[in-house]
Image (tube, rainbow, N blue to C red):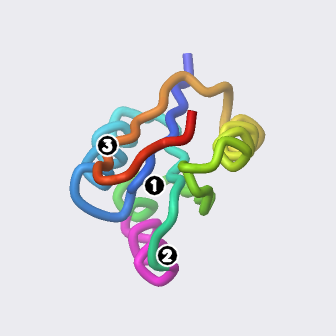
Amino acid sequence: MTRTAIITGPTSRIGLGSAKTLAAPGCNVMPGGLGDAAQIVETRARRDAASGGTAAYDDADVKKPDQIADLVAQTETRRAALTGIAMPVGGGRVAQ
């Protein structure tokens, strides 16, 4: 079974570590969230080179329910059925 996960905050610290850890055993990783565009491009290139895969990215604001729904839909369209979500970021609040 192919595993597919959304990772928020994927360009630094815990989010980057989570993305690398999940991608290593072959999990499809869909990074999502806000961030510096240049840093996102650089992080994707490094991850692609390390894993031999290709990374997609969605700049969804995970504080907005409609953008979360779109992130999930884009993940399932670009990758495969979603099997997990990692939101290893702090300091913000997610709308409910």
Instruction: Please report contact status of discs 1 and 2: CB closer than 8 Å, yes or no.
Output: no
Q: Which residue is mark 3?
A: 88
Q: Residues within 10 Å of mark 2 (few under 14, many from 20)?
A: some
Q: Quadrant of residue 26?
A: top left
Q: Which quadrant of the rendered structure holds the N terminus?
A: top right
User: Closer to the observer: label 1 or label 2?
Assistant: 2
Whether residue 23 sits left or right of residue 55 in the image: it is left
Please identify the dominant SS of the magenta region.
Answer: helix
Q: CA distance from mark 1 to mark 2?
A: 16 Å
Label 1 secondary element: loop
Residue 75 to residue 96: above or below:
below
Q: Which quadrant of the rendered structure holds the C terminus?
A: top right
Q: Amino acid at mark 3?
A: Pro
Is tag 3's residue or tag 1's residue first in the polypeptide sequence?
Answer: 1
Q: Amino acid at mark 2?
A: Val
Question: Would you say residue 40 sits in the magenta stretch?
Answer: yes
Q: Quadrant of residue 58?
A: bottom right
Whether residue 22 sits left or right of residue 78 in the image: it is left
Q: Which residues are magenta?
A: 37-46
Residue 85 to residue 37: above or below:
above
Query: Residue sitting at 71 percent across and 35 percent down?
Result: 76
The image shows residue 17 at horizontal and vertical percentages of 25, 49
The image shows residue 91 at horizontal and vertical percentages of 30, 53
Whether residue 68 sits left or right of residue 48 in the image: it is right
Q: CA distance from mark 2 to mark 3?
A: 20 Å
Which is more toward the observer, 57 or 54?
Answer: 57
Q: CA distance from mark 3 to mark 1?
A: 24 Å
Q: Which residue is mark 2?
A: 41
Q: Which mark is residue 52?
A: 1
Label 2 secondary element: helix
